[in-house]
Amino acid sequence: MAQADEFGEELADFVRRVAELKAARSVPADDLPTVLDAAIFELDHVAGQLWPWYESLSSTGPSGVASVDRQEQQLLKALFQRVPVPVALVDRETVVRRLNFAATSFTGVRAGYATGRPLTGFLAHADRAAFRSQAAAVARGEGDRSLTVHLQQQPAVPVRATLTALRPGGEPRTAVLVVLQPADSRVPSHERVLGPVPTLTETTRHAALMDLVDAMTTALLSGPAGDPSGVLERAAGVLHGRFADWVVADVAGAARLSRTTVLAPSDSVEGASDVAAQDPAACPLVVEAARGGSTALRVRPEDPDAFGRDTSGAPVLVRANVTSLLCVPLTSAPGPVRGVLTLFRSGARGAFSMAEAQAMDMMSRHLALAMSAPR
């Protein structure tokens, strides 16, 4: 019984250390590799020390001790499932025998589905041969291995796989314990498997776009329809300032485009007058949008004459210090182009994003419908 008592004390100490490892999930990401090393050490301690000790006691001790040890065995199985790092137990052919809860969240594969299937089936094809080779080497007793692989569900995310040999009690063959973690050493959350969680900045930008779309819809519904110039003037008022520094609106007439609205920053009144007097046919971007019906997004436009020159002879993009622009045709397919809306951002203001261009494209269709509606 002295050996059984000593075994019980050792097991109790082990359980306490495991509880500390569970609590360590909240440590900073930079400290998690140390926690991972400790978890692997404890698993190795179970395989190399506690399990052989248990087998010795169960084979020589009374049935009461064997019953207690069976309970401890169940505890060790529960421990494997609850270790806060993704862990899989595979054979030398990489067939999964066990997959813990963290590993199911990390790989996105249910444990019941994974068991009995090769772990290589969940990796990118290019990594499968190397992983099988390293697993076989570990199972032969050639030492622990580590390599970078990629999950088939997330081929762009590198994953570090650490392999170590493990001999379960009463089994003739060596198994392989596989620990998975992102290559940047951070233990992934369930959200990372499903997709990135939007940041506060992204959420704020999305909310601002939704507010803009709501304001545009309100402006279109609150005024008379069927008046192209009036519709564009109301739309320009919504976009000016909150979305763009400059708003230039051109209406497509029977023969040619005509400029109806130019809104500029308060310190560019003279420049706005010159742009308003410009012939839209002299603006390559406007002409292209009216003919092709496709949105143009330019960031730091290289061609200074892309929007033509104003009445003073200066390139509009240079005079307005344009850092990004959107040139959007107003059309509701199928149907003709009703006009062209051009938006400038200048100075230190951030460039138009793809999400903003997409939102503007949606609003352009609404504008075209309002312009073509019967009076």
Image: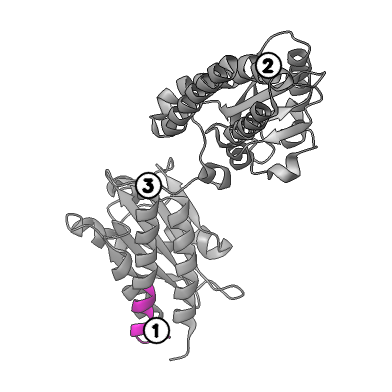
Please identify, in this view, whether the residue under mark 1 or under mark 2 is nearer the observer: 2
Residue 106 x %, y %: 59, 38
The crowd level at tag 2 (other Cα within 10 Å; few <14, some 14-19, many 20+) is some
What is the number of the mark on residue 139? none
Residue ID for mark 1 = 227
Query: 45 or 302: which is nearer to us?
Result: 45
Residue 190 x %, y %: 53, 44
- Circle 2: element type: helix
Please identify, in this view, whether the residue under mark 3 or under mark 1 is nearer the observer: 3
Q: Is residue 176 visible?
A: yes
Name the amino acid, label 3.
Ala
Name the amino acid, label 1.
Asp
Q: Is residue 304 above or below residue 254?
A: above
Displayed quadrant of residue 159: top right
Q: Is residue 91 above or below residue 194?
A: above
The crowd level at tag 1 (other Cα within 10 Å; few <14, some 14-19, many 20+) is some
Residue 298 x %, y %: 45, 48
**Left or right relative to 233: residue 335:** right
At x 47%, y 51%, the residue is 354
Residue ID for mark 3 = 351
Query: 148 or 132: which is nearer to us?
Result: 132
Sequence order check, earlier mark of 3 and 2 = 2
**Left or right relative to 109: residue 194:** left
What is the number of the mark on residue 52? 2
Please identify, in this view, whether the residue under mark 3 or under mark 2 is nearer the observer: 2
Displayed quadrant of residue 370: bottom left
At x 30%, y 58%, the residue is 246
Residue occupying the far bottom of the picture: 375
Name the amino acid, label 2.
Pro
